[in-house]
Image (cartoon, rainbow, N blue to C red):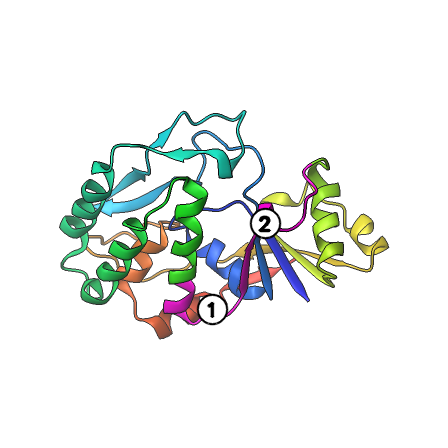
Amino acid sequence: MKLAIMQPYFLPYIGYMQLMHAVDKFVLFDDVAFINRGWINRNRMLVNGQEFMFTIPLKDASQNKKINEIALSSDPKWRGKLLKTIEQSYRKAPYYGTVFPMLEKIINFTAGTIAELIYPGLLELNQYLGITTELVPSSAIYQNDHLKAQDRILDICLQEKASHYINPIGGMELYDKDRFSQESIRLSFMQARKVVYPQLNRTEFMPWLSMLDILMNNDVDSIRRMLGEYDLL
């Protein structure tokens, strides 16, 4: 069984979805420390053809709290503002009519925490793209937050009886292939290739934006082909 473990990201970039598509089970690592100014509650889109960082506002966010403890802002106006920005920026995109209702559902989902908002949003994306990977929050199952770093990842792999663990390329210095091999687990690192497609109001391509941009500019079959644009090292 192929397994991946990642922190929950809101409307993530294509590499995140490639990783999810590549495995049988994807663990949302939601009971680890929140990272300020990371990718959990923010990402990039195009506004008038220029890079724009959108952010889901949080309440009392701190790296001393776990991700699943971080509450959303009590001011609901952010939802309407974000949807308005998306509408104004992408209403002329080729797949706006299909994608915008899905984004409304994702953004307007009733949730108290950022983790509770992200999980159903990823399920929506998976359903739209035909990704059948099982998605599970780490806080719901493993009860191993006393372990740290590689030991905790290995423990989840062992609990799941995984034969192959796949991690983004950024973790090459964090994990030891020999240590995984001792447990009869193959360790691979995913290197996403640069995916290029026509972007609204852009002549020079802007890479690694949120899936929001890819969804607005491409049909499902094209995106599914993009999901295979990676190398395992």
Q: Say what amino acid the circle numbered 1 marks.
A: Ile
Q: Report the disc number at residue 229.
A: none
The residue segment tinted magenta is 125-145
| Crowding at mark 2 (Cα within 10 Å: few <14, some 14-19, many 20+) | few
Q: Is residue 173 magenta?
A: no
Using the rendered view, name the quadrant where residue 122 is placed: bottom left
Q: Quadrant of the C terminus?
A: bottom right
Image side of residue 44 versus residue 7, left or right: left
Residue 131, horizontal then vertical, whole percent: 47, 69
Residue at the spot 72% in from the left edge and 61% down from the top edge: 162
In the rendered image, which quarter contains the N terminus? bottom right
Horizontal and vertical percent position of residue 69: 49, 34
Residue 133, percent across and down?
53, 66
Q: Residue at x 77, y 59 (%)?
A: 185
The residue indicated by pointer 1 is 131
Q: Looking at the image, is 74 positioned above or below residue 139?
A: above
163 or 176, nearer to the observer: 163
Q: Is residue 168 visible?
A: no
Q: Is 179 rendered above or below residue 146? A: below
**Residue 138 is one of the magenta-drawn residues:** yes
Q: How many marks?
A: 2
Q: Is residue 34 visible?
A: yes
24 displayed left or right of 45: right
**Which residue is pictured at 20% across the width and 56% down the height?**
200
For the residues labelled 1 and 2, say whether their Cβ atoms are less than 8 Å apart. Answer: no
The three-letter amino acid code for the residue at tag 2 is Ala
Work out whether 210 lies above or below 66.
below
As drawn, which residue projects farthest toward the bottom? 221
Q: From the viewer's perspective, is 88 left or right of 120?
A: left
Q: Which mark is residue 140?
A: 2
Identify the secondary structure beneath mark 2. Answer: helix
Give percent across and percent down for residue 117.
Answer: 39, 47
